[in-house]
Image: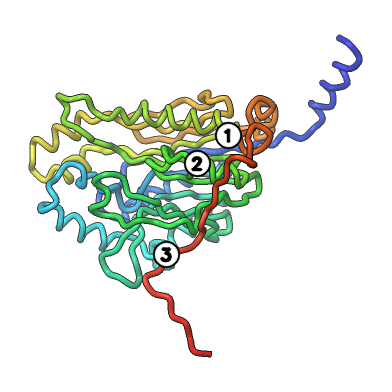
Amino acid sequence: MQKTEVYLEKEILHRKSKKVKVAAAQISSVYIDKDATIEKIEKFAKEASNNSLLALGESAVPCFPVWNLVHRPVDQHKFYKLLYENAIEIGDEAYQRLSDIARKNKIYLSVGITEKSSKSPGTMWNTNLIFNPEGKLINRRRKLVPTWAEKLTWANGDSYGLEPVDTSFGKVGILICGENTNTLARFSLLAQGEQIHIATYPPAWPFDRPNNKNYDLLEAIKIRAAAHSFEGKIFTIVSSGILDDEAIKFISNGDEEVMNILQNSPQPVSAIFGPTGELVSEPLIGKEGIVSAEIDLSECIKWKQIHDITGGYNRFDIFKLKIIKRELKSIEIVEDL
């Protein structure tokens, strides 16, 4: 080995790597029961407390409204009311319990919730919260556009939390389900310095009946997660939910056709992807559990020599992206000074 090569190898070995343990918990929500679901999250957080970051799936608390996709709108009113009653208002008791879980386990906790409005009873958003190890809320993201039948439940979100947040190990960003197909939303996070991406997904996405070509949620997740990691040269944590037998029974509400659709819908996956789009954890499919991996953020540097789409591999004199970052409010009161 040449002297230069020996020197470089020693330098690399002596430099501090940026390693961190991260995890995703794939759970079945206790259908529409926020208290029981938060208790479940507490158990999984304790089990995963040897990690620095734990991510849970889309609207884990109190549940993802799968009924939007399989029941007629005129049959959904009872579900909607139950969901609102179990949704979380920022600052309420359920919110505080999630904050306490992060603090007690000394982890960054990312959790999907259905958030309800304090001003307009009945209005809800598909929201993701990130708490730091002190239990402080450091990001609240509302899904920009509810996907397809989700519009029966959730209102449009805003760009207020559309940014990666600083942690002790790097910048963490979050997009919810279909937002991971929104090219501009993804680029906006990368351009703001995202190093670890969280992508959350539902427990099921029955887009068609079992006899027809359905939406393959598993493959769709893998494609999007690998693509975002590869394009940005970053790590992606995918966290999905699952439907257990009790949830299927609850949603079906005695309708055998609905039960058949849910039992035969493609299942999602939870996994962790690296900066070349490869899996760096075992994928978890169709069951509850935790996936985790020790990732080294310094690995991302090497791959940006090829494509750095937020740096040297772009033409910002040609392309421009502008984000209007504000929280949507129903009224703005201007006092007469």
Instruction: Identify the residue shown where x is 37% and y is 29%.
Output: 220
Instruction: Identify the residue shown where x is 18% and y is 54%.
Output: 79
Instruction: Identify the residue shown where x is 50% and y is 37%.
Output: 237
Check the image and name the residue furthest to the top: 1
Would you name the residue on which mark 1 appears? 232
Mark 3, Cα crowd under 10 Å, few <14 / some 14-19 / many 20+, is few
Q: CA distance from mark 3 to mark 2?
A: 21 Å
| Mark 2 / mark 1, whichever is N-terminal | 2
Contact (Cβ within 8 Å) of mark 2 with mark 1: yes
Q: CA distance from mark 1 to mark 3?
A: 29 Å
Along the viewing direction, whichever of 133 and 264 lies nearer the viewer? 264
Q: Is residue 230 above or below residue 87?
A: above
The percent coordinates of residue 214 (x first, y second) are 23, 28
In the drawing, what numbered circle is on residue 126?
none
Q: CA distance from mark 2 to mark 1?
A: 9 Å
Q: Secondary structure at mark 3?
A: loop
* Residue 308 left/right relative to 179: right
Amino acid at dot 1:
Gly
Amino acid at dot 3:
Leu
In the drawing, what numbered circle is on residue 328?
3
Check the image and name the residue furthest to the bottom: 337
Q: Secondary structure at mark 1?
A: helix
The percent coordinates of residue 207 (x first, y second) are 23, 35
> Can residue 246 be seen here?
no
Mark 1, Cα crowd under 10 Å, few <14 / some 14-19 / many 20+, is many
How many marks do you count on the picture? 3
Would you name the residue on which mark 2 appears? 186
Mark 2, Cα crowd under 10 Å, few <14 / some 14-19 / many 20+, is many
Q: Secondary structure at mark 2?
A: helix
* Residue 125 left/right relative to 256: right
